[in-house]
């Protein structure tokens, strides 16, 4: 039995990147973020689609993800956002990856290796302008850049930073952008020619023109999710992922019958129950028990009772004409109705990123190339 499957609409990926490009303009390069298996959508097919649609760079978290992309034949620059450990330096050169650096020790080791290979290694310098995560604290950026500029074999392509509050706080976002600009000035004073500087994630790419610099790093928006609901007026994004399954059993229960573990749902009236063969093992958040909805025959139907490991019950009393094998949409569209990643995230007490990654990694994927 195939429990459930994820449909990935690759045309929507192309559409979304074009839409982002329309907003940022021709001069700005794009570096779509394809970490976490392209947010659960599939690293290689999504990356191939993005490159065909004109992505200038790709960004991943780990060296291993970069190796997978190179092995699949992709040859755009691949930026490793988390940086590298000394033990990974050989792979950086073998697979021509572009690391982000923020530790002098690693930069020195990269420089030595570059000299050994007689190569010039492009790197990005990661600055912490207020995320408090990876990167050289912005006040120490000038010293770090100076030390780095003295290392032979390295070419600083640009500086990069990450916004902590792009979705929620204009004022602090502006402070981060200002700090970033100050870092760029000190780089200029050092005589560094930085070609591609970038700080913007999806929210900033669509909202703050002064966050563009020479490149942007959109993730969520590439997958068709709005970082801010207010952007719906200006940008037309298309969701890429759907999550579907089929009804495997139908039956009527009388009034006052308990449903599933713990009897957290008691039928208030005679109830027609549809059973689907997926549960929290397929990523269906257990928090959606008695809370979530699915689409059957283009209508919303509530999840009743506790979600089990591989089974979930749906109240379909008011929906006629359902057969065994009827398609059920957990995420996505059916007819006029739609269940979005944001709706699921809200009900499950998490964020859309988590919904996409979890559904994507827990289920087999089907790629739709034409519509
Ligand atoms: C994940 C990530 C992004 C993309 O962020 P979105 O909010 O998905 O657009 C950009 N930059 C860095 C450093 C990231 O880790």
Image (cartoon, helix red, strand yellow):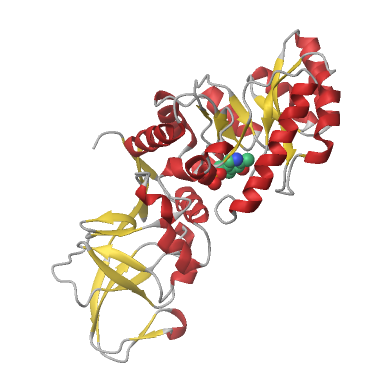
User: What number of labels is visible?
Assistant: 0
**Residue found 57% across the figure and 37% down from its top:** 210
**Residue found 53% across the figure and 21% down from its top:** 76
Percent coordinates x, y for residue 221 in the rendering: 45, 44
Front-most of residues 327 and 240: 240
Please state the quadrant of the image where ligand 1 appears: top right
Quarter that holds the C terminus: top left
**Residue found 58% across the figure and 38% down from its top:** 211
**Residue found 39% across the figure and 70% down from its top:** 292
> Most extreme residue toward the top, as rendered?
118
Percent coordinates x, y for residue 142 in the rendering: 82, 31
On the question of residue 269 being in view, the answer is yes
Quarter that holds the N terminus: bottom left
Quick check: 110 above or below 1?
above
Left or right: where 345 falls relative to 116: left
Front-most of residues 127 and 26: 26
> Most extreme residue toward the bottom, as rendered?
256
Percent coordinates x, y for residue 135 in the rendering: 75, 39
Quick check: 93 above or below 175?
above
């Amino acid at each position: 039995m195939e429990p459930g499957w994820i449909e990935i609409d690759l045309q929507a990926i192309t559409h979304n990147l074009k839409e982002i490009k329309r907003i940022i303009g021709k001069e700005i390069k794009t570096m779509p973020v394809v970490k976490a298996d392209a947010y659960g959508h599939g690293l290689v097919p999504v990356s191939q689609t993005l490159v065909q649609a004109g992505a200038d760079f790709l960004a991943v978290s780990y060296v291993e993800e970069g190796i997978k992309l190179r092995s699949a034949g992709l040859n755009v620059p691949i930026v490793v956002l988390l940086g590298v450990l000394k033990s990974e330096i050989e792979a950086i050169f073998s697979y021509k990856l572009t690391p982000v650096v923020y530790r002098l020790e690693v930069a020195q080791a990269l420089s030595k290796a570059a000299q050994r290979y007689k190569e010039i290694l492009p790197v990005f310098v990661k600055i912490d302008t207020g995320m408090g995560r990876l990167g050289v604290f912005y006040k120490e950026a000038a010293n770090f850049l100076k030390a780095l500029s003295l290392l032979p074999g390295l070419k600083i392509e640009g500086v990069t930073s990450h916004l902590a509050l792009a979705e929620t706080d204009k004022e602090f976002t502006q402070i981060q952008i200002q700090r970033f600009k100050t870092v760029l000035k000190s780089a200029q004073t050092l005589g560094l020619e930085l070609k591609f500087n970038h700080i913007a994630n999806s929210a900033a790419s669509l909202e703050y023109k002064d966050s563009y610099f020479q490149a942007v790093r959109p993730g969520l928006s590439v997958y068709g999710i709005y970082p801010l609901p207010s952007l719906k007026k200006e940008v037309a994004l298309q969701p890429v992922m759907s999550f579907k399954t089929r009804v495997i059993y139908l039956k009527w229960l009388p009034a006052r019958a308990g449903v599933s573990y713990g009897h957290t749902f008691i039928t208030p009236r005679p109830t027609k129950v549809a059973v689907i063969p997926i549960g929290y093992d397929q990523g269906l958040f257990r928090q959606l028990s008695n809370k979530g909805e699915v689409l059957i025959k283009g209508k919303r139907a509530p999840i009743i009772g506790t979600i089990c490991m591989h089974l979930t019950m749906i109240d379909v009393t008011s929906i006629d004409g359902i057969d065994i094998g009827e398609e059920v949409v957990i995420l996505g569209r059916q007819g006029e109705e739609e269940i979005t990643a944001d709706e699921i995230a809200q009900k499950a007490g998490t964020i859309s990123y988590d919904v996409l990654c979890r559904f994507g990694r827990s289920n087999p994927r089907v790629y739709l190339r034409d519509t």
